[in-house]
Image (cartoon, rainbow, N blue to C red):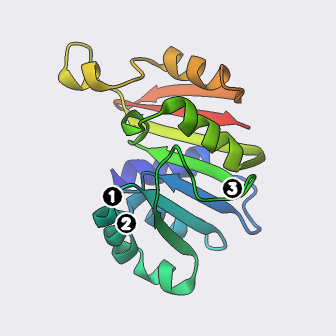
């Protein structure tokens, strides 16, 4: 996933990040997306959360240099109860995790709460083929369902793109 994450970050997150840009990656798992954000944005502060203590330990290990520098912070937490103040982040990302979030209403409300005004929410997920078990499992079956879920919760500028077996969703607070 690492190369695809890098290309996606470059295409959808690059912009005016010359200052102290602050990211949150929800469901950071083993820390690949954190490493990508850390490398791509040398002045950014990158936070990651995961519900699993094993994954948070692995993410810290994978990103040990950024952790030592104080630029990468990893915490055990859930998407539906983010341990951050309102308007803390310029961008929130979810790489291959949104379909695992428990309470979607609470989780999306939390994303919106912690985003700064005008902040971006970027979702990247594998796009399952119809008729597969994965398609039966996922919450969002197509890009229209992502658009509806975010627009109905007050996110604006919702863009969905399907490429290389993945859906990329970008929305703004």
Few, some or many residues within 10 Å of mark 1 (<14, 14–19, 20+): some
Residue 40 in view here: no
The quarter of the picture where residue 62 lies is: bottom left
Q: Residue at x 47, y 68 (%)?
A: 74
Residue 64, position in %: x, y? 41, 80
Is residue 145 positioned above or below 26 on the image?
Answer: above
The quarter of the picture where residue 147 lies is: top right
Is residue 145 positioned above or below 76 on the image?
Answer: above
Question: What residue is disc 2 on?
Answer: 56
Q: Residue at x 35, y 27 (%)?
A: 127
Question: What residue is disc 1 on?
Answer: 52
- Which of discs 2 and 3 lies nearer the camera? The answer is 2
The residues bearing labels 3 and 1 have C-alpha atoms spaced at a distance of 22 Å
The residues bearing labels 2 and 3 have C-alpha atoms spaced at a distance of 20 Å
Residue 105, position in %: x, y? 56, 30
Q: Contact (CB < 8 A) between labels 1 and 2?
A: yes
Question: What residue is disc 3 on?
Answer: 89
Q: Nearer the viewer, residue 139 or 39?
A: 139
**Quadrant the C terminus occupies:** top right
Looking at the image, residue 127 sits to the left or right of residue 43; the answer is left
Circle 3 — which element? strand
């Amino acid at each position: 996933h690492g190369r695809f994450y890098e290309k996606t970050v470059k295409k959808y997150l690059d912009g005016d990040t010359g200052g102290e840009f602050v990211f949150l990656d929800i469901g950071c798992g083993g820390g690949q997306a954190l490493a990508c954000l850390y490398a791509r944005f040398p002045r950014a502060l990158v936070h990651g959360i995961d519900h699993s203590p094993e994954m948070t330990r692995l993410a810290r290990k994978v990103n040990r240099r950024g952790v030592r520098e104080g630029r990468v912070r990893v915490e055990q937490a859930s998407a539906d109860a983010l341990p951050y103040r309102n308007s803390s982040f310029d961008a929130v990302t979810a790489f291959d995790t949104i379909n695992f979030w428990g309470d979607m209403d609470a989780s999306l409300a939390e994303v919106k709460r912690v985003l700064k005004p005008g902040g971006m929410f970027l979702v990247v997920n594998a796009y399952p083929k119809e008729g597969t078990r994965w398609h039966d499992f996922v919450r969002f079956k197509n890009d229209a369902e992502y658009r509806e879920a975010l627009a109905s919760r007050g996110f604006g500028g919702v863009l969905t793109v399907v490429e290389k077996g993945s859906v990329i969703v970008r929305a703004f607070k």
